Image: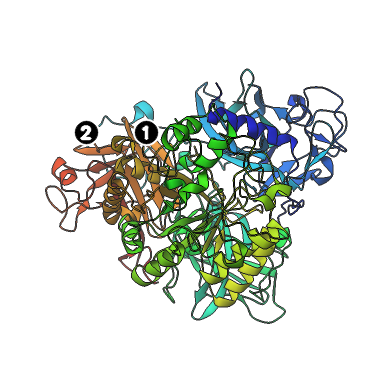
Amino acid sequence: MMTHLARLLALTTLAATVSAQDSQAPYAAASTKYPAAGLVIHLKQYFNNRGTSLDGTVEHSGFGFVNGSTFPAEFLPRGEWVDDGVRFQFTQDWGVDAADNIRADSQTITLDTPREVSAIHLVAAGEDPGGFLKGETEEELLLTFEDAQTDTVGFEVKNWWAIHWTNKGPIRAPYHFQPDGSRNYNATHLFHAEIVLPPPKHGSHGAQPGQPGQPGRAGSSSLSSRKLVSVRLPGGPAPINALHIFAMSLMPTSSGPHPGERGGDSNKLSIRSVTATRRWEIVDDHRGQIVEVTLANPYSVVHHGDHSAWLEGPIKVSLQGGKGTQTLRPAMLPRLMPGDEVTLEIPIKPQSDDATFGGAYLVFDGPTLQMTWGGDAIVGGSEMVHDWERWTDEAGDLEQHSAPAWYRGAKFGVSGSERLELSSRVRGVPQSIFIHWGLFSVPAFGGEHDYAEWYNYWLHDDPVGSTAYKHHLETYGPDFVYDDFIPIFTASKFNASAWVELFAEAGAKYFVLTTKHHDGFALFDTKHTSGRSSVRLGPKRDFLKELMEAAEVERPELRRGTYFSMPEWYNPSYQKYGKVLFPGGLAHNPFHPDTTEAYTGYVEVDDYLDDIQLAQMRILAQDYKIEIMWCDIGLANRSATFAAEWFAQTSKEGRQVTIDNRCGIAGDFDTPEMTKFENVQKRTWETCASVDPHSFGYNAATKPEDYRSAKDIIHSLIDITAKGGNFLLNVGPNGDGEIIDAQARPLLDAGRWLKVNGKAIYDTVPFALLPEVTTNGIHVQFTRTNHAFYIISLQRPTTPYFEIDAPLPILEHDRIRLLGAKPRGGGKDDGELEWRWRDGVLSIEIVEEALDAVEGAAGIAWVFEVEYVGTERSGGIQRIGDEL
């Protein structure tokens, strides 16, 4: 018998043949105004698939993304195309009767000349037709080098379209052609995937663990150069989600500094991109528009041990000149090791009413580097903002909105200080709480690996065959319908203050409450739009209001968000928009199929989208002052109208808010579900997962020992943070409104770890060159801030020397401490540890007593903080982050 998971997947596949209502995604190809980099690899000889067409016609069976589905050729760029500073080359003749892409099937791409490269860039997409559970294809490349050594690197690429998410690829169309030539009006994309090559290890060249070494300024032994010879693509028999590749470029590295080389430190700096956003920061009472500047050290990471290949700071970076560009506060670059890349944020303001970015240039000012860089039009992205309240419902306008600094973990507001503003594009507030609570919490039942909050759907989807049907019949009888749970939903033990206190003690920075799930039962006052709510029925209480007020008064540091289901399974007014798993119309009684069930509290309206969906989103935004709109499912929607109104109003109020990518428009952040990634994701993302490993809603059958442990939660949080994401961790209160001890206890234990080690999590950005490494059997992950680098060991470090074979941005004057350790044993008075580079391996001296004395670790993870210390100036040492 088909499981519910299998049925879900099967119905998802069916969605490929249904045209969803998404006309808000016109083509918006990326462009750049600054010099592009990248070595184009010509792929024509490897093309084995035609994925595009002019009118949906494909002459050969087996071609296309899914046996004939094609990308409309009119929306594709031709010839040279640049995205995020990387150059690609496309055909001039899309849609003709010729192959135009590679459907990956273990092909080997051989370079004309072996080259040392830092990254591989692809324009690609997975071919899976939409989907509710997986939004990307997970792949692996096999790399072969000139010395015959091989390495593998994992990566992800999003699917070319999805019915659940609205993605934001740099190449997109408002529709794609289905196999019969008809149009499916779901936004359809090609994505730019950056695959950073892992740096080589020293291998046998390093000393054995436990042996002392010699101090070094950086790695005292250079890594061996590795020239790439070939790349073997993923593949295999009948892949579930094949990868389609349309273009490839390599990012070559510089060979390294040479004696007498002209240009000095300017040779150690490559400007990858300058991009204006529509985020702001208040600096000295001025609203400063954020401009992101991505910088790289083009020298290969193999020169990590050569101090002359490092760009040392601190270096102030500002954007000046042109037609009225004023920097409110320079960003600061503390250092840039070979092969490293960072994105800085510079807040600017217009100096006049007609100011533009035209002619603006970058200024670099540091002890070893003074230079300017610019041209006629170096700033891409948004135009200079003069009216922050101007927002329209056009997709191109809304897509300039991005998640604010508080969501990504930035803390700006130290007026007048000069520090590295690492871009919030990859910064996260990693720990947050999701709450799935509602009518479904009363039956509290899910079959094996079934979401309990989908109880009403499982009950009606497969009568007789489903575990929900059998459970319901045995427990409640054939005459008890889903809405009969309403009077039982008393929430008698709900305590908003207790919830808020738990979230704060768990280390969360924001929470998201399920205000209305797919069953249409709301936990807020829906006013005239519906009587199907906890305010009108059952407990007669506005739970959202109670929770928001408790948070605002008792824990004002917590940001507040709401989950909102766009469709309702069985709302009669939704029937005209019904699709696949969300049919609309009254449900048929599973035990009496000839009868329909009442939809308690239903109010007849003219149109579901205008009078229920949009109206309720406005209520949430206006009456409850939410800061996160976390939609689900998308499908037919009025989200563009809502977002334009919300962005304008909150801008007027001086509030920065954010919206996810499940509203039917390309939101500020992606929302993979119960997913982690192999590498750093440049687009803002947040993964949601539950303390119950199989359900978001409360499932009474889950055993206490089956809930996630604090160690599992923290290890997931560390990995997600190291890849640039946020972690939205779900709890499912029971029908009485209690968060049971088996769920609360691991949250509190995780919170205790965060109180000691939170500096390595909050306000951090990834070390994209190498987010993680396993050395001597110990898995280590890395994060960093404007003034420090963090080494997070997921297993107990070795003693007396903890060694990490990895090129890290650490210099000789930096200070290393073990967070939470009390100074004792071999440590210095202030807890500082002795350390050194030896043969290119970082070696930290640590004793067992110091590890035992760490507060809050409880065997979960150990964090070493590396405090950046700058170059010697006037006989002293400059701590990075101190005011210059």
| Viewer-closest of 357 and 560 | 560
Whether tag 1 and tag 2 are in contact, CB under 8 A, the answer is no
Name the residue at 31% across, 39% down.
Answer: 794
| Viewer-closest of 147 and 126 | 126
User: Amino acid under label 2?
Assistant: Gly
| Viewer-closest of 173 and 461 | 461
Task: Decide if residue 672 is in sight here.
Answer: yes
- Tag 2 residue: 210
Picture coordinates of residue 378, whole percent (x, y): 68, 62
Between the residue at mark 1 and the residue at mark 2, the CA separation in whole angstroms equals 17 Å
- Tag 1 residue: 774
Q: Nearer the viewer's eye, disc 1 or disc 2?
A: 1
Task: Decide if residue 122 is in sight here.
Answer: no
Label 1: which secondary element: strand
- Give the mark, 1 or 2, whose residue is nearer the N terminus: 2
User: Amino acid under label 1?
Assistant: Thr
Q: Where is the C terminus found, in terms of image quarters?
A: bottom left
